[in-house]
Image (cartoon, rainbow, N blue to C red):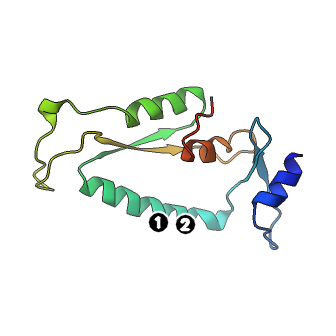
Amino acid sequence: MAEKRANQSTKKRTDQKEIFSISPDGEAFPLPLPEDYQKEFKRLQKLVAAQRKEGREIVVVMGLGFVGAVMAGVVADSEAKLSTIHHSPSTKSPLPRYPKFVIGVQRPSTRSYWTMPYLNRGIAPV
């Protein structure tokens, strides 16, 4: 069943064999290929630049198992105290109410990579 979902939910790459990470509910997610890393890095650079411009601190959580996923959620949901929301000298605008921007990093393994798309959908993988 998971193999059928994998074939339906991904584009076929003719030059390389795809390897999938299967979620507990059977949904298949292709692992990134080497050429995917540069594109993702550029995407993240743009996101980080925009978030820094807004005055947010960048936090990277390595590993999105139980502890990592919970910590990423706690940090992302942390709020600035009203007394600490002030004008940033660099942006001349109020610092954001949610001052942290969290980037989660998960090793692309068949066992656990599925946690990334789940978190990107707003679904807790635990």
Number of marks present in the image shown = 2
Question: Callout 2 environment at 10 Å: few (<14), some (14 to 19), or many (20+)?
Answer: few
Numbered label attached to residue 6: none
Asked if labels 1 and 2 touch by Cβ distance under 8 angstroms, the answer is yes
Q: CA distance from mark 2 to mark 1?
A: 6 Å
Disc sitting over residue 42 in the figure: 1
Q: Which mark is residue 38?
A: 2
The percent coordinates of residue 101 (x first, y second) are 37, 45
Picture coordinates of residue 22, whole percent (x, y): 77, 43
- Residue ranking furthest to the bottom: 14
Q: Residue at x 84, y 59 (%)?
A: 7
Say few, some or many: other residues with alpha carbon within 10 Å of mark 1 (under 14 / 14 to 19 / 20 or more).
few
**The C terminus - image quarter:** top right
Does dot 1 land on a helix, a strand or a loop? Answer: helix
| The quadrant where residue 75 appears | top left
SS at badge 2: helix
Name the quadrant containing residue 102: top left
Residue ID at (81%, 54%): 6
* 93 with respect to 99 (left or right): left
Q: Is residue 120 left or right of residue 93?
A: right
* Residue type (three-letter) at the residue carrying disc 2: Gln
Task: Give the percent coordinates (x, y) of residue 81.
Answer: 20, 29
**Residue 33 x %, y %:** 69, 62
User: As drawn, is 2 to the left or to the right of 118?
Assistant: right
Residue sitting at x 67%, y 58%: 32
Q: Decide: is 12 above or below 63.
A: below
The amino acid on which the numbered mark 1 sits, given as a three-letter code, is Lys
Q: Is residue 112 above or below residue 36?
A: above
Residue at 39% x, 58% y is 47
